[in-house]
Image (spheres, helix red, strand yellow):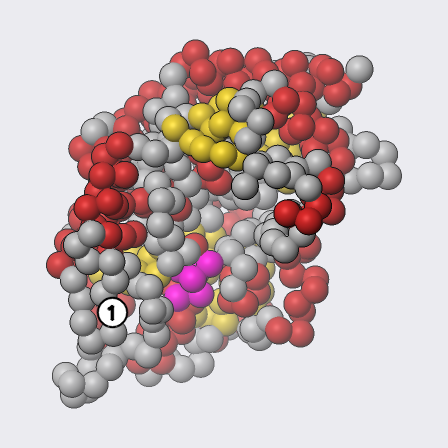
Amino acid sequence: MNSTTGDELKSWWMPFTHNRYFKDQPRLIASGAGAYYTLVDGRRVFDGLSGLWCSPLGHSHPHVVAAVQRQVATLDFCPSFQMGHPAAFSLARRIARLAGRPDDRVFFVNSGSEAVDTAMKIAVAYHRARGEASRTRIIGRERAYHGVGMGGISVGGIPANRKMFSSLMIPGVDHLPHTWDPARMGYSRGQPDWGAHLADELERLVTLHDASNIAAVIVEPMQGSTGVLVPPRGYLQRLRQICDRHGILLIFDEVITGFGRLGTAFAADYFGVRPDLLTFAKAVNNAVVPLGGVLVAASIHDAFMAGPAHMIEFFHGYTYSGHPLAVAAAHATLDELDGGGLIRRAAALAPVLESAMHGLRGTPLVTDIRNLGLAAAIDVTPVPGQPGLRAIQVFQRCLDDGLLLRFTGETLALAPPFIATDVEIRSAVDTLRRALVATAA
């Protein structure tokens, strides 16, 4: 469909989209190849956010395409309740080994939202299985994004995602403060030096609720969707210590950071902190077919393995868990990310992005710059009385000039594919600079 008329566009109620604004000024993609999209009007644009943080190999990667084509002609679906297919088991083993946790287990789902809700259920059920059924409370964090399931928005901390659904949220949730303080952290390159003490707020919540009632703490190692909020040095390590002291599970939501975004397989490796559960999705199979999962410590899994062997141990799962096409895409993607050296390439590109983005300091409208690994963001001065409009204006100018990036609130983010070149990254930031100058004029 190349038409952009109102009738052609009206049926799809688009997710996380200003539907009226979009359908008045539609932006439609026709195809993708490598690090570029082609719009329906023929314009070619650099994919500056790897899809939605999820396509590190770019688009239509030949190895992934071939793998999915072979799979759909061989086994297009396999039930995962009381049945299975070999490639799903080998993928679980491969992911656990990539994480440096070969004895741990993987529970497959279809998205980051499902992964978070699954991890929360595992955490609460684990404590119950061990005779600590009072441990039901889960601690999230302000400004966190953990998907759009009822569990995820309950522990999440983005007000707009929560306010319409307050009556549906799960009880027994509290939140740590977020870690961003522009007065002390502004224009930080990588991890800020200030702020590790913010993890001590967890001790206050333990005192308030008592450790015997807390099942888990869930955090994004780097908060991506809310604007690349980078944890202070020592912060995650301190959270781990406090959780250990009180018998609380630590969950890392690595839906964005997993599979190389920080130049290591997982953010847990980058920060040297081992969570008890780790959620993933997005880049695991280059987002070709929906796939996500939870990496679960062996000791947690083993707590469920009680009672008669013929009985189901964990009453949870999805029709499409471990879908053959998604699994085939994941194996092909990991061939490139790990075996093909693209995770190392992401690490090599990170300083290129850092240098280019921090070169925007002093550019009109820019009020802050943050980066970690192959991800970076700027904040811009809002239009008085019209929150969010300024970032949309800059986004549109970038798109018109051949760059697709991400905007949310007054933040614009870049997270290019791992296959991007140094020149493409610098050119993308130059495009952003021109858009800022033109918008401010």
Q: Is residue 135 left or right of residue 140?
A: left
Q: Quadrant of residue 297?
A: bottom left
- In this orientation, does residue 185 appear? no
Kindly identify the amino acid type of the residue bearing the numbered disc 1: Pro
410 over 169 or under it: above or below? above
- In this orientation, does residue 157 appear? yes
Q: Quadrant of residue 270?
A: top left
Residue 49's x, y, as percent? Answer: 49, 32
Q: Residue furthest bottom?
A: 308
335 over 73 or under it: above or below? above
The one nearer the camera, 314 or 427, is: 427
Give the mark count: 1
Q: Quadrant of the C terminus?
A: top right
The one nearer the camera, 80 or 409, is: 80
Residue visible at 52% across and 64% down in the picture: 149
144 over 205 or under it: above or below? above
SS of the residue under disc 1:
loop
Residue visible at 41% across and 56% down in the picture: 111
Q: Quadrant of the N terminus?
A: top right
Residue 63's x, y, as percent? Answer: 23, 34
The one nearer the camera, 337 or 219, is: 337
Residue 13's x, y, as percent? Answer: 63, 55
Residue visible at 62% across and 73% down in the picture: 168
Instruction: Write down the region rendered in magenta.
Output: 113-118
Residue visible at 46% across and 75% down in the picture: 136
Q: Is residue 90 magenta?
A: no
Residue under label 1: 79
